[in-house]
Amino acid sequence: MYQKYYSRFLQAPSGAPSSMLHMACHSHHYWPDVTLDAVQQYWRDAALLADDKWGPIFEQKIPAWQAAVARTLNLPDPDRIALAPNTHELVYRLISAFDPGRPLRILTTDGEFYSFARQLQRLEELDTIEVTRIAREPYATLAERFERELHRGDYQLAYASQVFFDSGVVFPHLLEIAGGKPERTEFVIDGYHAFFARPVDLGPVADKAFFTAGSYKYLGAGEGLCFMSTPEGCKLRPLNTGWFAELAELENRADRVSFADNWLRFAGATMDYSTLYKGLAIFELFEQQGITVEKIHSHVLAAQRRFLDTMDAAGHPLLNRDNLIHHDLDRGHGHFFTFDCGTAEKSEMLQKELKSRAVLCDRRQRLLRLGFAIYHGAGETYGQVFA
């Protein structure tokens, strides 16, 4: 029922339905058809209005985007949602707000996405940075172990993913942990694999935690537009700051660098806002059609259950329950499954085999990921994967 909104991707050049089964939607999600008109509108606005385009973008488009994100996540103050081309820029800007001359202790897990993991490794080369990584496995005790260390140690920053990028496992009770964090600790939730996939209610922790995500994955608006919600009363002064952060004071610049008490505190500099137009078009389409995150999640859960049934009957040597890292859909799972193939060579071989059968997926070393989206048919059994 949702496929009609993605016809440009799901139709073969001849106009017939494509035989490709796109199961890399957790990496690059197909864009709804409305995004074509949206990006063309951005071109017209940017090319014809020239510098005058900033008025509509900052006065209309950005507030509309912030309001849509706030509704999706139940955030009380849309004006506290900062924008940037990627989450790394936002998170590093936050890290830069800590005094570089004083020790900085960071608590995280050993399962964070590459950009944050690499950045921490580089920061650890400094004598003032200390990082503690809690092992994500066993997942059953992760929440208890992470929370115990959070309150035991003297941490200025804690960072964890709501859904782990490599396995699809949901960090149990993460929002509750963030809500009960020590006052001295800034808490960041990487929500990229949760946003617009799983229902998320940030209302209870809006004044406790930062939340980062973006449009590239499950919203399906493409790369180039990410956001970070900021707690009320945040007084951090990022060392990494751009001219957008003083838009309100350009005509009356002071000798001291000041920060607005809204999203501009973490703003950077000039960026391409074509994805902003695409994202707004998708929000508008879904609102008009009554497509909610809850309905999307329900559709994907049903697809995942059909996949597991087909898999169990197939007896595949690699795609089976023993190699599936996590499949407890009742306890919480992201919108993709991850199979541990044992070696990188085996996962690469399996990826190529699936592609030869018109099944597109992705891999992370020895892990092979198969994702599910609302543009998968309601009757799809995924037999093509196991043929």
Image (cartoon, grey):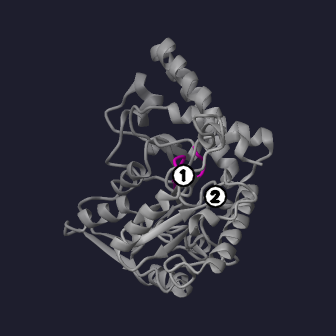
Magenta region includes residue 359:
no
Type of amino acid at the residue the image marks with label 1:
Lys
Q: State the predominant SS element of the stretch in magenta.
A: loop
How far from the left and from the top, in percent, is residue 200?
A: 66, 61
Q: What residue lies at 74% left-to-right and 62% top-to-bottom?
A: 298
Residue 217, numbered circle? 1
Q: What residue lies at 52% left-to-right and 36% top-to-bottom?
A: 275
Residue 197, numbered circle? 2
How far from the left and from the top, in percent, is residue 254?
A: 36, 31
Type of amino acid at the residue the image marks with label 2:
Ala
* Residues drawn in magenta: 212-220
Magenta region includes residue 217:
yes
Residue 337, numbered circle? none
Query: Considering depth in this image, is 97 or 66 the residue closer to the camera?
Result: 66
> Quick one: quadrant of the C terminus?
bottom right
Q: Could you classify mark 2 by the number of other residues whose Cα lies within 10 Å: few (under 14), some (14-19), or many (20 or more)?
A: many
Is the residue 275 above or below the residue 51 in the image?
below
Query: Considering depth in this image, is 10 or 281 the residue closer to the camera?
Result: 10
Residue 160 visible to the viewer: no
Element at label 1: loop
Q: CA distance from mark 2 to mark 1?
A: 9 Å
Q: What residue lies at 54% left-to-right and 67% top-to-bottom?
A: 163
Query: Considering depth in this image, is 58 or 346 the residue closer to the camera?
Result: 346
